[in-house]
Image (cartoon, rainbow, N blue to C red):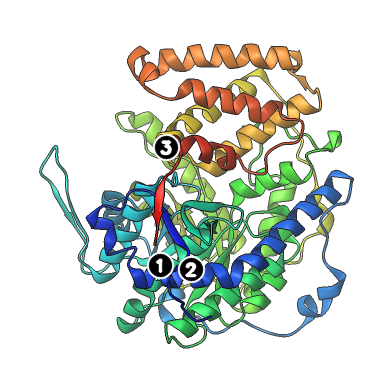
Amino acid sequence: MTAKPIQGVTILGALPPEYESILTEEALAFLAALARCFRGQLRERLAERKGRQARFDQGERPAFLPETAAVREGDWAVAPLPPSLQDRRVEITGPPERKMLINALNSGAKVYMADFEDSLAPAWDNLLEGQGNLIEAVRGTLSHLEPLTGKRYELNAQVATLMVRPRGLHLRERHLEVDGEAIPACLFDAGLFLFHNARELVSRDKVPCLYLPKLEHHLEARWWNQVLEAIEGDLALAPGSIRTTMLIETLPAAFQMDEFLHEHRGRAAGLNLGRWDYIFSFIKTHRMDPAAVLPDRAAITMDQPFLQAYAQLLIRTCHRRGCLAMGGMSAFVPQKGDEAGTARAFAQVRADKQREVAAGCDGTWVAHPGLVAVAQAEFDAGMPRPNQLDRMPEAPDPALLLAVPEGRRTEGGLRHNLRVGIRYLESWLRGQGCVAIYGLMEDAATAEISRMQVWQWVRHDVEVDGLGRLDHSLFHAFIQETLLQIRAEVGAAPFEEGRFLEAADLFETLVLAESPETFLTLPAYHLLLTPPLTGVSR
């Protein structure tokens, strides 16, 4: 890939002076070259996703691929981990907002994952401010002055290792077109970050790191590796300079963990248990099967056999190949002004991290700086060394990966899904992609569970305890009741000023669709970008 002149590049969105140093002519040429080189292959990969889902809808199930048996059975390992990536016992995640970024990097966690994906609503300002914040963070100059209190926030001398999660392959960034086509959002996010920061990080003896989300097939992992090889070539970086951790958060990916690592064997640093998207993917994969309807979201915990098998296989695969197995996110967060609620959250997080370190995970995720010490205490106690690469769990029974969890479907579970789904979508439409609701940190992944779970219940006309069959008219009545309840919770003025009615309409449309949207952020993005975009060619 060689950068070309930026003829054919159109920016659709305001470009005030503070963003001009981010979207420079050189950066735009770099992004345009990436798009022109790799978007055709990406379209093929996305078309293959649709074909696989169509086969799942007809009754086929994910399975280990016979054509890659030699990879699974082979004796190979990924490239050795650099020192900065050997101990990742606590990672904190969140959107790259200025104050949050400083607090997270200073939190004492080993890693901060700056998230352009599930915890960031992709408004134009959010994206470019986030990229600008990362440029300053890499150079150690990031600071923030809190307007209301006058408190100044600055980076400590020692901060967490920075990783960046770009958006998934299915999304487009409509604010930037190349030859009249919106650029793949993943190339926009990863390309801008690496263009501005990869060489700077290497010059400081640090490692450019990406977290890659929502992959479904090893050919998608191969596509990413080819993209990163091209970026390394253009930036005159040594092959494998950019290290990757891939999230195993789709059901098809659970059967291709070895293949994912093999595709990235020169750069893979680990795999991550992306439990919330994984539950969503489990529902989506089985969506047309009336025998695979899940119980209440609260009942789908990591002690369910299908999740235990998934975790066991991931830990075994990573340790066989010489990289880290990263645990997932506990959604519980401290509750300001509620000591009892915070104590319950700490207890839940503590139990979750005890389970992960005992299972053999090499680290875990938290969503709040106040939880770093809680999680670290459990990993320090259970993992005195930098990691647990010497632990090798037994291979799980493959049938358990497809075991449908048992449990009740209740009115309380339905009402919770509706409240969370509508309240989260309303926040997302206002540009906030990560929000605490009822003591849990909700992002797009957890909202997807709420949406797809209700879709499944309505689609298959299931019995809900205390309600009977959940048909369309009963579901609509619950939507109206939920709006009244939310109005009482947030207050009349915030309700009227917010986007709750739009969020409720969207949620109801998504649930009642004959064939569900692959991701709720696709139709929500259209509402986020209202009014329509206008711009000029460059």
Q: Position of residue 18 (x, y in %)?
A: 23, 56
What's the residue type where badge 1 is placed?
Leu
Instruction: Please give the name of the residue rendered at 70% of the width and 68% of the height, measured from the top-left corner.
Output: 218
Q: Secondary structure at mark 1?
A: helix
Residue highlighted by disc 3: 435
Quadrant hosting residue 390: bottom right
Circle nearer the viewer, 2 or 3: 2
What's the residue type where badge 2 is placed?
Ala
- Cα distance, mark 2 to mark 3? 34 Å
Residue 466 appears in the figure:
no
Looking at the picture, does residue 11 appear above or below residue 513?
Answer: below
Task: Report whether 253 appears left or right of 264.
Answer: right
Query: Tag 1: Cα neighbours inside 10 Å, few (<14), some, or many (≥20)?
Result: many
Residue 498 appears in the figure:
yes
Say which of 249 and 195 sits in front: 195
What's the residue type where badge 3 is placed?
Val
Looking at the picture, does residue 426 appear above or below residue 49?
Answer: above
Query: Tag 2: Cα neighbours inside 10 Å, few (<14), some, or many (≥20)?
Result: many
Q: Position of residue 48 (x, y in %)?
A: 76, 59
- Cα distance, mark 1 to mark 2? 6 Å
Specify which label sits upstream in the sequence, 2 or 3. Answer: 2
Instruction: Please give the name of the residue rendered at 69% of the width and 57% of the height, measured from the top-left corner.
Output: 46
Query: Tag 3: Cα neighbours inside 10 Å, few (<14), some, or many (≥20)?
Result: some
Q: Secondary structure at mark 2?
A: helix
Say which of 254 and 487 sits in front: 487
Specify which label sits upstream in the sequence, 3 or 1. Answer: 1
Q: Secondary structure at mark 3?
A: strand
Task: Find out whether the residues at labels 1 and 2 contact each other: C-beta distance under 8 Å.
Answer: yes
Q: Position of residue 513 (x, y in %)?
A: 72, 30
Residue highlighted by disc 2: 32
Residue highlighted by disc 1: 28
